[in-house]
Amino acid sequence: MTKPLNIGMIGYGFMGRAHSNAYAKVNHFFDLPMRPVLKAACGRDQAKVRAFADRWSYESVETDWRKLVERPDIDCVDICVPNNLHKEIALACAANKKMVLCEKPLAMNGAEGREMVEAVEKAGVANMVWYNYRRVPAVTLAKQLIDEGKLGRIFHYRAKFLQDWTINPELPQGGTALWRLDVAAAGSGVSGDLLAHCIDTALWLNGDLVSVTALTETFVKERKHNLTGKVEKVGIDDACIFFGRFANGSLANFESTRYARGHKALYTFEINGEHASIFWDLHDLHRLQYFDHRDGGLTRGWRSVHVTDGEHPYMANWWVPGLQIGYEHSFVHQVADFIKGVASGNLAQPTFRDAQRTGLVLDAVLASAKTGQPVDVVRD
Amino acid sequence: MTKPLNIGMIGYGFMGRAHSNAYAKVNHFFDLPMRPVLKAACGRDQAKVRAFADRWSYESVETDWRKLVERPDIDCVDICVPNNLHKEIALACAANKKMVLCEKPLAMNGAEGREMVEAVEKAGVANMVWYNYRRVPAVTLAKQLIDEGKLGRIFHYRAKFLQDWTINPELPQGGTALWRLDVAAAGSGVSGDLLAHCIDTALWLNGDLVSVTALTETFVKERKHNLTGKVEKVGIDDACIFFGRFANGSLANFESTRYARGHKALYTFEINGEHASIFWDLHDLHRLQYFDHRDGGLTRGWRSVHVTDGEHPYMANWWVPGLQIGYEHSFVHQVADFIKGVASGNLAQPTFRDAQRTGLVLDAVLASAKTGQPVDVVRD
Amino acid sequence: MTKPLNIGMIGYGFMGRAHSNAYAKVNHFFDLPMRPVLKAACGRDQAKVRAFADRWSYESVETDWRKLVERPDIDCVDICVPNNLHKEIALACAANKKMVLCEKPLAMNGAEGREMVEAVEKAGVANMVWYNYRRVPAVTLAKQLIDEGKLGRIFHYRAKFLQDWTINPELPQGGTALWRLDVAAAGSGVSGDLLAHCIDTALWLNGDLVSVTALTETFVKERKHNLTGKVEKVGIDDACIFFGRFANGSLANFESTRYARGHKALYTFEINGEHASIFWDLHDLHRLQYFDHRDGGLTRGWRSVHVTDGEHPYMANWWVPGLQIGYEHSFVHQVADFIKGVASGNLAQPTFRDAQRTGLVLDAVLASAKTGQPVDVVRD
Amino acid sequence: MTKPLNIGMIGYGFMGRAHSNAYAKVNHFFDLPMRPVLKAACGRDQAKVRAFADRWSYESVETDWRKLVERPDIDCVDICVPNNLHKEIALACAANKKMVLCEKPLAMNGAEGREMVEAVEKAGVANMVWYNYRRVPAVTLAKQLIDEGKLGRIFHYRAKFLQDWTINPELPQGGTALWRLDVAAAGSGVSGDLLAHCIDTALWLNGDLVSVTALTETFVKERKHNLTGKVEKVGIDDACIFFGRFANGSLANFESTRYARGHKALYTFEINGEHASIFWDLHDLHRLQYFDHRDGGLTRGWRSVHVTDGEHPYMANWWVPGLQIGYEHSFVHQVADFIKGVASGNLAQPTFRDAQRTGLVLDAVLASAKTGQPVDVVRD
């Protein structure tokens, strides 16, 4: 009954696994008109991609992504490779009329992103970027509450993404495992890797950012490079702080770093509205903190909402109240929504165009960090 | 304008300090018709009681409590000595028509307590027992919410008081500092010291306990005795667990111990009602956790109420929202309420009669622990 | 390379889904010598079992469990039906030399359990009971810490399993969805359903329980029965509290209820040892609270351990530090361990024999609740 | 034995109460060579200052602060009036050779502060500013840990002070109760009121701030003025965000607002060091969160330290472990330290000179907010 959606996966790293798991699980839990079929996995290392394909039951392997993109039996290409390869592959997908799913950030910068948006829109192919945190049920619930007007006028939006895994100066940069530390492959450091998530969520929940002022720092100036074997200058930002203004008049305060000892992946956001406030924390992703000033004064307090009830977003598809789901489920939800979007013609967000907005904020952030001046965010 | 209330303090230990502080502060923060005047402090050790009196500005000292009780310039005697002395002093206070404030537990057992209740009631003197936790604002707020019917039918009442300060077997028993470990002075161990607090709060919030079944344990069987210098059998209970039934049909589960590593003074209670639940924790005494099922489903959750607003019990007399008060303030509140009760003729709770109810539950708990059988709580 | 392990699933309810998901996922994340193959699903309702089989890709369906048990192409039978059917099916599995996985509790009571243990042991078939919480990484970590002796002598073990889903007296009992409220199908109420989990974990972490004293209550005395359509007496326990003694001298305090407003599935346990304490809570299952008295005094405090690092149990197989897994993963781990046990001949715990220990504690608890007397736990 | 320290209090508002309480209590809990004597209270409203003096047992009242400052029986003047009066009074104190205690912020701006520092230093009088949060035991403990080198190289310092009490646009500005909303009396809004606390703590814990970039916002542009009765422009900042660099190379991210719904007085700071991190929150001021990477990997986690043990700063003077103190105690500690400083000749921090450093950061913050440019902090 369900139509096949033939997937070609490019890359077999962390995100390759996360997406493959989503494809494998989604029809067990969601009633959908299509079923992902794992047609082919692609990677430059034949043995490794073979092992990956075996583990996840991909039907075939490719070692040249161009071949995969041209295969007539592939409907949809999933780009899970370093950022510097996104554009070229996406353009090829558009040229071959493939649907295209791209890991975040969309591109190395806004200029690349613009080309990608144009290509997929001109080709008329379905497209989406894996800003998966939108589909953590607690985050989706936040969106619902905001859309219902529960918060009233918004005054503040605060987001942080704190990690601590690069404090050790002996950690090298570059190569398969550590391309995120290599500016040539990643384009930027915590901005594109971590802040991009914070910005995507913020634009979705709170609308456009108008202007930003930023500060970046590279704490460890040189690291051995895995590809050259030499100690080389570190080109990425280790930490990035920015503030600014949203179009709705609220203030932004964003920060990310990989030097916050004690935090593994502490993505938090807080929104303060006239009537109510919301706080979320990736470390306990199944909870939403909600404060409503309209609650009776004597018992007013932050509510710790365990987002595991059937009426909570996506949760009727899983277990029973009190039993939490995890990180990987956000990808399952995103695949489910992507399929619904393809079937209905109303594409699931964030599309390339949606994700490009984040890219343009990142451009402004990095530009401001260079000069110390406020920079207006470009609108495509 | 304010009349003096002449206080005679017997004892100068931890509770002597806590009460003296309350007497010294209460009129700074509460508008009251009377003002405690620290007339005399009493203790067997002349030098120590002198130092205590100097520190707290007591006008005089006594070394014989009988003398203090008979002094015509004393209106009100405060008993802050080990439990085995409560009865005799209280009876003397009644005989001398002194108001009497007594540290908890009221007595060594129900039989002693009965005599004390009769004595003060026959003498017609104001009387009160220092179950101070009733007047932590968050606990008083719990009482208000229950009295307003917010919880509906009650199903469960759960209380614990966990400490860890006696795990070391080298700790001796007895003497001034450690009389709580000496059964001759204390009457019992954690039951009278810690569970007594839990029971007092429970009877106040949830009504009478009808029957109980208990288990006690003494983990360290022998300790050096400070008075004899010899290793002696430990007569107190180190831990006590009981369950039972309240008159309103709800179930009780109570536990206290001094062997719960990591807990300094973790007094917690939780009440589960048909519509709402309440949780409180002495370690964060300025917060009340409140869950109301009638909250909208999507944002239903435990509310963490920071009990520091002006409309919260007692809090208009202190600082501003967000600024917490501490342990000592519960005693200030109790003095304020005692004075209001004396002035109005409507005595503040818990009176000796109220506290006797806790004593009778303790009797039943200790009786059950001996036989393993359920024991009905006697009603005086 | 991996050998097939042909699974026959009996039941297609909540647990049928949870186990099917585990079978489908396990080889994606764990390197194992066998691979579950979903051969057949069995249920009395042909249409429903068909739909279930389609969703999970079971190769065939049966409507008579006896047929399934006799099928030569089935290696391993998974019993996911109400408790009153466990014994008969398990005995048939043994008779047919099938491996058998059984949902918890093992049986309606100790007598049934004894038969089942004897049958599978005599038949020499691999067997396991789905006490899945042992394999939540934080719980497994607790086991490691205890086995390393970090806690020292144990004084207290405290466990609760609190829910609130049956407070509404209009909720009926019995039938497919609500068999847990029907004593004929479930055998008992919260004891077998919830306390069984607490007891299994406790026996694993803290050794045998020697004696118990219990109290049970049925708050709603009558409910409409889904099978008869009539209002009938409720035979299950709505709440159960017990205390007792472990063989190692520590004290037990256990409670479960479905009338604790605000708690969806609050399974918590705490262990207090001489040197350290541990606390865990199912509502935040990826965290372990750990207190170590040997930490330096100034910074000693309860550590909130986010159990998501590669060195934590099972976690190297999932994502990266900070990214949590959920409830369903405990079943994946259990399948992985079961397969390793089958391959090595060293069966994964808990076997039927292990689970029977929990059944015997439940027998003692329910016996004590009837008489109010302490009851010794039988040792098979 | 203890010498009198004759206090003249100017102002009788919130801070007048907080300081009076500290003077009244300090010798009950601390052994000190001097004892504050409440000689005189001063305020323009005779009836109100009389009532205040009666409540706190000040021996006399004045309605003209110049008179009080000139009284030969006053040793030490305490300035608890709006910011625009600090300078003039402080200069008069210096001229009269009075010790002077001043509420924070020291002055309306750095220029005023400079005059004040020069005056008291030239006069050689003891001086101190009431940045009381330094003496919350958990904050003092943070200082100890940093000074011991526990954190190693510092990467990040993050502070927030969030309130929500001015969201209502009907709230007027100005007058006795609301002078903090009137720029003429307060000098600035949240910067001087709230951020000043954050900056003082930061300079103490983490050293100098070198440069800052700031953003301010006034959400409610006009409010009725209590003094004129007319709707007038609001001149204060309702919210202020800044980032910057410390001299030690770490990055600053600071924010304060009175428009963060749900936060009464949420002053938090977090310091991320190479080896360890610290977090503190005024809403639970008796706790310090501490993470030490050197803890064993399996049980590494944020430690919640209940700062109530005898070995914790100041705590041996209060109650017993587990029993918390509150907001007011920070002032008691500050008085105790002030007296020790006067007696020893080694003045307690922060002196006017220390507090001026905070004033200079505020100047830079407000200057940057006007232009959007980074501004270097002036060093006096």
Image (cartoon, coloured by chain):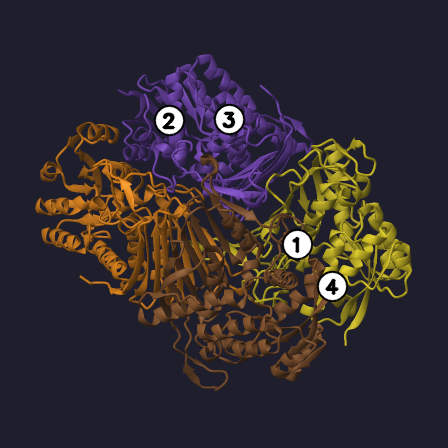
Chain colours: A orange, B yellow, C purple, D brown
Q: CA distance from mark 4 to mark 2?
A: 74 Å
Which residue is rendered at x = 49% and y = 45% of the image?
D150
Which residue is rendered at x = 36% and y = 30% of the image?
C43
Q: CA distance from mark 2 to mark 3?
A: 24 Å
Judging by the rendered image, the residue that carries numbered circle 4 is D2
Q: Have a look at marks 1 and 4 and say if they share a chain.
A: no
Judging by the rendered image, the residue that carries numbered circle 3 is C107
Residue situated in front as seen by the camera: C132 or C174 = C132
Judging by the rendered image, the residue that carries numbered circle 1 is B205
On the question of residue A257 being in view, the answer is yes
Depth-wise, is mark 2 or mark 1 nearer the camera? Answer: 2
Depth-wise, is mark 4 or mark 2 nearer the camera? Answer: 4
Which residue is rendered at x = 43% and y = 19% of the image?
C347
Q: How packed is label 4: few (under 14 Cα within 10 Å), some, or many (20 or more)?
A: few
The reply, left or right, for residue B370 in relation to residue C56 is right
Depth-wise, is mark 1 or mark 4 nearer the camera? Answer: 4
Q: How packed is label 1: few (under 14 Cα within 10 Å), some, or many (20 or more)?
A: many
On the question of residue D262 being in view, the answer is no
Q: Have a look at marks 1 and 3 and say if they share a chain.
A: no
Q: How packed is label 3: few (under 14 Cα within 10 Å), some, or many (20 or more)?
A: many
Specify the label residue C336 is tagged with.
Answer: 2
In the image, residue C33 sits, relative to residue B155, either above or below, namely: above
Residue A184 lies, in percent from the top left, at 20, 45
Q: Secondary structure at mark 3?
A: loop
Type of the residue with mark 3: Ala
Q: Earlier in the sequence, mark 2 or mark 3?
A: 3
